[in-house]
Structure formats: C-alpha cells, structure tokens
Amino acid sequence: MVHAGCQRFRGLPRLFRPPFPGRRAGSVTATPKAVAGISKVSAEQHPTTTKVQILPDGEFYPPVGEANGRVALVLHEAPGITGNVRRRCAMLAEQGYAAFAPDLHRSGRALGPEGVRQAMAAFRAEPQLLRDRVNESLDRLCALAGATPHQVAVIGYCFGGMAALELARSGAKVAAIASFHGLLLTSAPAREGQVHTPVLAMTGGLDEFVPPQDVLAFQNEMTAAKAPWELIVYGRARHSFTNIEASIFGDDRMRHDPSADQKSWAALLDFLETAYA
C-alpha cells in the first residue's frame, strides 16, 4: 500500500547493574515547555505535568491520570537520554503508559561524538552485548512497574531503534517492538522462528544511514525468519525525522520532518492498539 509519500510492507532473569556515575537519583516535573514542539498532532497529546523519577540507571515516567496497564521501554538515540526520548516518554505517560528510558551506555550522561563512535562500533561488532543490555533494561522496567514482559512495548529511536530490533532478534516475548529511524542491518540476523513479537520498523526514504539495500535486506531477513513484521518508509524523510533537535548535530543527513513525525507517531499508536488487542 502506498499513500502520501510512504510505503507500508506487511510480513507475516538477567542482572541489573549497579548505579552509574554521573546520574543523581530524585524526581522532577516535566512541564509543557519541556515536552512541547514535536508536531501539531503530538503536541496535543502532551501532559500538563509529568512526574519523572531520575534513577541511577535511567528515567521512569509514571502514568498521568488513569493507568492503562501498559508499559513502555523507550530506547534512546546514540548520545544517550536526551530531549527526544524524554518527550516521547512524557507523551506515552499521557496515554496511560508507565515508561522507562534506560541508560544503555551506563555512562550516567550523554556521550560526546567520540564516545558515540566507540559505543556504536562496539555494539555493531557484538550485537549480543546490545541484546543483553536491552533485556536487562526490560527486567528493570518490569520490576519498577510491577509488570510482566507481555505488558511491555519496546520503542526505540535511532540507535535505540537498532537496539529494539536486536531485542526482537534475541527472541524476546513482549507485546510489541517499534523502531523509529533505526539501523536495520545486523551481523547476527534472526533465524527462522526466532522473532516472536510483532515488529514495526519506520524509516526515511532519504535516510543515508539506512540505504535502500539495507531496507531490502531487512525485509528479506524478517520474511525468512517468518517474523510478524511491518515496515513503513516515509519517502522524503531523512535520518532522525522524529527529532526536533536533529539540526544541533550539524549533519545535513539528519533532519526533523514534521509530516513524517506526525504520521509515524500515529502509526505507532495504531500498531500498539492492535498489538494489545
């Protein structure tokens, strides 16, 4: 199915690490100013206030108002826990989710360019390391929220999108897995029957970090694995199309796209409703 510049393709206990340096536990309130400005559609879903628990290993966002019994593990971009992931956690909390953004780097702070390069190289070379990190974060979230993995949606952005897909390849059984502009290739492809959870991958048609051959390879991998997968390509979108702060990286290959941002958020909510039905 093709419409409005996007394509949709449909296909068929771990240890918690000790507190990280640099992150001080406590709680803060996320105000509308802190989470506003994503897009016209998503801005309407922002909470008036969101209580955030700052933990040694990440940030926990309790549901705003009545909880819906669902839980979200929200995986950060390459530098670490920054504005985009915090906004998404707040938006999910407004939807009734309990959301947790774990520090996958275990650094307690956002990484600089060299730190990002080193971390990405390590995780690309050893996918199992990333899979273990995400699985440990999943256990941590379940402990925080008093939930089971079957209640958890795993949602990742950029590096976090890659991490979410590695979780799917690990055989994890959660409610849903979604990747926003994440890298699609892996050095350890899923085997037949290994992916148990519905997967939604969303990418930009102009994303130079995810060229067409990678998109095709991902489709072939998921099909061969007999995974329950979907892929949406937003035709004119570049890398980081959901991130309103993408321009600060000074890389023209990374750009916020308001249209793709709105459509992908709506696609996520629709995907989650189906997954939890």
Image: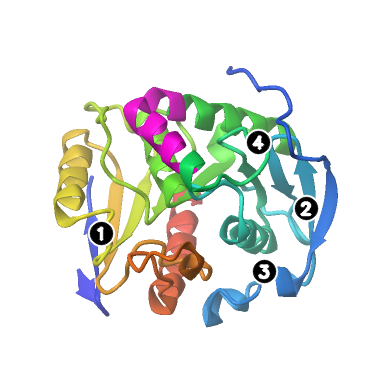
**Sequence order check, earlier mark of 1 and 4:** 4
Three-letter code for the amino acid on which mark 2 is drawn: Val
Q: Which of the pair 151/216 is nearer the observer?
A: 216
In the picture, the disc for residue 208 is: 1
Based on the displayed image, in which of its 4 quarters is residue 85 positioned?
bottom right
Left or right side of 78 for 204 = left
Location of residue 116 with respect to 84 vertically, above or below: above
Q: Main secondary structure of the magenta part?
A: helix
Say which quadrant the N terminus sits in: bottom left
Viewer-nearest of discs 2 and 1: 1
Q: How crowded is the residue under tag 2: few (<14 C-alpha within 10 Å), some, or many (20+)? A: many
Residue at image location 34% in from the left, 53% down from the top: 201
Q: Position of residue 260 (x, y in %)?
A: 38, 72
Residue hosting label 3: 35
Q: Is label 1 in a helix, a strand or a loop?
A: loop
Q: How crowded is the residue under tag 1: few (<14 C-alpha within 10 Å), some, or many (20+)? A: few
Q: Is residue 243 visible in this depiction of the protein?
A: no
Viewer-nearest of discs 1 and 4: 1
Q: For the residues marked 1 and 4, what is the alpha-carbon distance in whole angstroms?
A: 33 Å
Viewer-nearest of discs 3 and 4: 3
Left or right side of 65 for 105 = left
Three-letter code for the amino acid on which mark 4 is drawn: Leu
* Region of the chain picked out in magenta, as a range: 116-130
Residue hosting label 2: 52
In the picture, the disc for residue 141 is: 4
Q: Is label 2 in a helix, a strand or a loop?
A: strand
Q: Is residue 249 magenta?
A: no
